[in-house]
Amino acid sequence: MKKISVFSAFGFLAALFLLACASPLFADSARNKKALDEFKQIVSTRYIYKDYKKVHWPSLYAKHEYKILASATDREFAENLNGLVLELKDAHFSVMDGEGARLPSLKRPARVTNYNLNAIRRIIGNLTKLNEHVSVGKLGKVGYLMITDWDFPPDEYADILPKSLFSETFFGTGGLIVDVRMNHGGKVANCERFAGEFASANLLAAYHHSLDRSGNIVKKEYYLRGLGVRYAKPVIVLMGNMSASACEHFILQMQTVAHVKTMGDNSAGSTGLPRNYRLSNGIGLTIPSAALMDLKNTYIEGYGIKPRETVPFIRDKSDNVLVKAFQKLGERVID
């Protein structure tokens, strides 16, 4: 019989050991199970859409649990957990690894734009960028304010938006167009504060659903907090399928104001006020904590907000939605 050398035997055992370490048997199952149980508890008590999404949670967990528990590293745990999260089809629900890097999240469905930036610049002519988020201009007696997102610090907000209503650009105008057709969201506090600049009293705008500590839904009224009417002339808010998240808070609030009219196309239907959590193995989560319902008690998530006047967008060299808004405010557009 051929003898096996000591070195060959050692190499064989070492290879076996490395192979075994890469197998589920050598994963830190207890650590993984603890983190997965924490995830389940957070979802059960903090995820606002846990019932609304019509997910059969036992089946979903059964499908992914083996891979999650068998994760050999925390990074692998995050990736396997993310596989479960992606099945929720929720753009506001995401997983971060131990370094805080966000894993690939749900790709938002392709949005249909209803604006033409080149035409906007051409029609306004004097469009001025106040910062990376806000641009202003004027055509005749109508002011134009473009807000591409709400994601800027409060001190920058204070220097830009309220002051713009009193700037020379809008001085003496007979109407104002607020364009949020390309606004994907940002800080809710900013859009709530700006909406308050158009009202002198608190106005019921929507209903707000959140969860108590036991995971039960708590329904509250959601108000526009009036700060005093800074601009009392007619206002048209242009909206569309790209208007999402915090911007949908803004649209709901502006629709309560008598001298404001919304125009364009349905909003994105993507809200959730995400909050951050961290599991015991260092993996981070961002989970929707609250949901909006309109005054007809219809969820915004997945449906969006309908404008007061729907204007189908015509894909040509102009921007017919903007043109119609100017016409509504008494200003003829030659483009």
Image: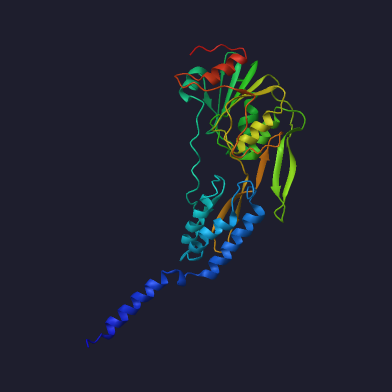
Q: Quadrant of residue 195?
A: top right
Residue 20 versus residue 269 in the image, above or below? below
Residue 46 versus residue 112 in the image, above or below? below
Q: Quadrant of the N terminus?
A: bottom left
Instruction: Find residue 166 and report its horizontal and vertical position in percent.
Output: 65, 23
Q: Quadrant of residue 219?
A: top right
From this viewpoint, which residue is outermost toward the right?
A: 201
**159 relative to 115 in the view: left or right:** right
Instruction: Find residue 115 and report its horizontal and vertical position in percent.
Output: 51, 25
Q: Nearer the viewer, residue 327 or 195?
A: 327
Instruction: Tell me, yes or no, if residue 266 can be seen here.
Output: yes
**258 relative to 106 in the view: left or right:** right
Color scheme of the displayed model:
rainbow
Instruction: Tell me, yes or no, if residue 171 can be seen here.
Output: no
Q: How many numbered marks, from 0 up?
A: 0
Instruction: Find residue 24 and report its horizontal and vertical position in percent.
Output: 45, 69
Q: Quadrant of residue 243?
A: top right
x 34%, y 79%: residue: 13
**10 relative to 242 in the view: left or right:** left
